[in-house]
Image: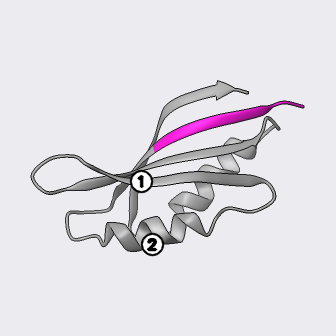
């Protein structure tokens, strides 16, 4: 089984979201299945920021959905969007 690398854009629920706290919570998702390699805060517009997240995981059935569900379960996470996906 191969591995897949995915880059996500994660937005907060609203403009008052503590995006740094959300980024710290996302870092804690990393485990034996999901290797969260980078969590970066990027500027969006008018002082708003989003989280650019890079994760590597096995290319198993349902793992991508499972990871996205774990991210969405974090408090104050709004939108989760795939920016890039590729096989390693």
Residue 80: image location, x then y, percent: 45, 47
Q: Is residue 34 above or below residue 27?
A: above
Residue carrying label 1 = 40
Question: Of helix, strand and loop, which one carries label 1?
Answer: strand
Instruction: Give the tally of numbered discs.
Output: 2
> Magenta region, mostly helix, strand or loop?
strand
Q: Residue at x 19, y 56 (%)?
A: 48
Task: Please tell me the numbered disc located at residue 31.
Answer: none
Task: Please tell me the numbered disc located at residue 75.
Answer: 2
Q: Is residue 88 above or below residue 73?
A: above
Q: Residue furthest top?
A: 87
> Left or right of 77: which side holds 44?
left
Residue 75: quadrant of the picture: bottom left
Residue 55: image location, x then y, percent: 62, 46
Circle 2/circle 1 CB separation < 8 Å: no
Residue 47: quadrant of the picture: bottom left
Q: Is residue 12 above or below residue 2?
A: below
Frontmost of labels 2 and 1 is 1
Q: Which residues are magenta?
A: 1-8
Distance of label 2 from label 1 (alpha carbons): 18 Å
Q: Residues within 10 Å of mark 1 (few under 14, many from 20)?
A: few
Residue 78: quadrant of the picture: bottom left
Q: Point out the image quarter for the N terminus.
A: top right
> Left or right of 1: which side holds 80?
left
Q: Is residue 2 magenta?
A: yes
Nearest to N terminus: mark 2 or mark 1: 1
Q: Point out the image quarter for the C terminus.
A: top right
Question: Of helix, strand and loop, which one carries label 2?
Answer: loop
Q: Residue furthest right?
A: 1
Query: In front: 37, or 3?
Result: 37
> Left or right of 37: which side holds 1?
right
């Amino acid at each position: 089984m191969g591995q897949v690398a995915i880059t996500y854009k994660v937005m907060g629920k609203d403009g008052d979201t503590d995006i740094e706290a959300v980024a710290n919570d996302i870092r804690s998702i990393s485990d034996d299945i999901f290797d969260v390699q980078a969590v970066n805060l990027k500027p969006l517009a008018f002082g708003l920021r989003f989280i650019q997240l890079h994760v590597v995981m096995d290319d198993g059935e349902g793992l991508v959905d499972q990871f996205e569900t774990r991210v969405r379960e974090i408090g104050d996470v709004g939108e989760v969007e795939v920016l890039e996906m590729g096989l390693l």
